[in-house]
Image (spheres, rainbow, N blue to C red):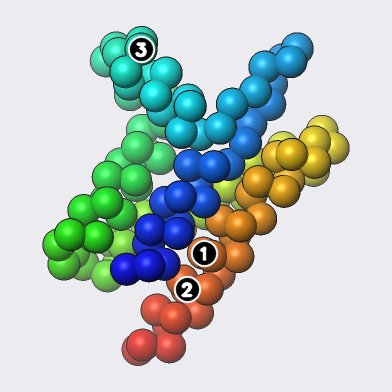
Amino acid sequence: MKIKILLLISFLFCFLEWGNNKSAFIFEIIYTLFVEKLSVGNFFHPIIFISFISILIILTSLFANINIKLEKITVIFLTLLVLFFLLIGLLSIRYKIILSTLPFLFIANYYFRNTFKLK
């Protein structure tokens, strides 16, 4: 359970930069999209939809038993998204992006090592 909480927290603190001096953490983007600019159109972007559903599934798994395969798939989706952020940071040489993705990747690595050990 602690690993799932750490996964969520580290994902929400991934940092993104774009354009001229525009930047935000994931939790700030989620707040902006779903509280300040609530619109059905926000859900149709694949990155937003997959990350939102993944966050909901991991939150659900904190309080209820869900299928372990579904949980692993959601962590894989979030890991792929964070790897995409890391690639963007590496290609644009943005150290804040690179450093903000590393905690999630370390925790996801620990998560997968523990879940495969349990088998």
Q: Which residue position is annotated with label 3? A: 36
Give SS at disc 3. Answer: helix
Q: Do residues under tags 1 and 2 come within 8 Å of each other at their CB atoms? A: yes
Label 1 environment density (alpha carbons within 10 Å; few <14, some 14–19, many ≥20):
many
- Residue 42 in the image, given as x and y percentages of width and height: 36, 18
Quadrant, the C terminus: bottom left
Marks 2 and 3: CB-CB under 8 Å?
Answer: no
State whether residue 7 is above or below residue 44. Answer: below
Write down the residue under mark 1. Answer: 108
Query: Disc 2 on helix, strand or loop?
Result: helix
Q: Label 1 vs label 2: CA separation?
A: 6 Å
Q: Is residue 15 above or below residue 42?
A: below
Residue appearing at x 45%, y 59% in the figure: 6
Q: Amino acid at mark 3?
A: Glu
Position of residue 29 measured from the top left corner of the image (x, y, whole percent): 48, 25
Rendering coords of residue 92 (x, y %): 82, 33
Residue sitting nearer the eye, 18 or 13: 13
Q: Residue at x 32, y 18 (%)?
A: 35
Q: Nearer the viewer, residue 62 or 105?
A: 62
Residue at the outermost right position: 93
Which SS class for mark 1? Answer: helix
Residue bearing mark 2: 112
